[in-house]
Image: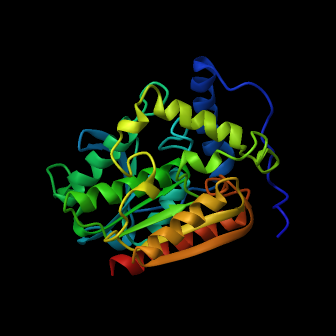
Amino acid sequence: MRLHPATEPEEAGAPPDRDEIVQRRRDDDREAVEELTGTPVEVAGVDDRTIGGVPVRTYVPEAAAGASGGAVVYLHGGGWVFGSLTTLDGVCRRLADRSGLVVVSVDYRLAPERPWPAAIDDGDAVLTALTAGELGVADLAVDSARIVVAGDSAGGFLAAVLVRRARDAGRAVAGQALVYPVIRRAALDDVGDDAGAAEGLSAGSMRWYWDQFLGAADVAAAAPGELDPMTADLGGLPPALVLTAEHDVLCAEGEAYADALAADGVQVTANRLLGLPHGFLRKLTVFDAAGRTVDQVAAWARGTVG
């Protein structure tokens, strides 16, 4: 299907330096508030707190206020370098409202200041605290057996790693929802740097994001699945929703991961979103499909936790 006309091509130029990264983070937050979110969806409660030693923002929908129920742990996108609680605030509000589940948005540490494994460890700390019912989360009344882990782009990668960690640690997770996820750097090996630039995210930029995320990590020493979910044993992972965008340089790797999950016996719901580019989800005022996609994730999560 033809690329959505609101898609903006990637700007040409050198990768940003440290000062430019910090400024872009500020600009992204401002843009989210002033332009991309629209009128925020009202929920029963929004609270900035710490869970498992990690800053989070919690969203309690009217349907869940005062009742024990499920939750969605959400990891934002942004190439592990950008993104924040603010950039995905509109998405998380709508997700909580439409699903009737508590949403816990994780403010994980960003690269290049805090490279791998900081972001994964932060997400793991939050998920562990929720599944273990640790102190500081009792007021959320989350049923630890009814938690879905979700994320978009780089957050989808984090979600995929977290559910595998949880399985290996014997902690039950009800499901995983991955929206145009990053899966493996190796998927870009035979792709030219300019591929995807017209659709908003080039292979060259994605390689740069991987470099920031990995830092000085010894990739060869990483445990199976930590830096490439495709290298892990996928059997026994929870049901998955995998949504890919048709005009996205990451589309093929997301779909390959969905196929790999299914081949290892995981219940998978996969859908390619036609006409759409990478990164559309947070642009609720630009892409009508953004709201519909949040609603699809919400309905799936609600059905998955029961």
Position of residue 250 in the picture relative to residue 12 (left or right): left
- Residue 12, position in %: x, y? 81, 32
Position of residue 148 in the picture relative to residue 153 (left or right): left
The front one of 61 and 194 is 194
The residue depicted at 29 percent of the width and 66 percent of the height is 173
Rendered-image quadrant of the N terminus = bottom right
The front one of 135 and 297 is 297
- Residue 56, position in %: x, y? 35, 45
In which quadrant of the rendered view does residue 19 lie?
top right
The residue depicted at 67 percent of the width and 37 percent of the height is 205
Position of residue 233 in the picture relative to residue 201 (left or right): left
The front one of 260 and 5 is 260
The residue depicted at 42 percent of the width and 79 percent of the height is 267
- Residue 294, position in %: x, y? 56, 66
In which quadrant of the rendered view does residue 207 lie?
top right
Please tell me whether residue 89 is drawn above or below residue 215 in the rendered image.
below
Please tell me whether residue 216 is drawn above or below residue 244 in the rendered image.
above
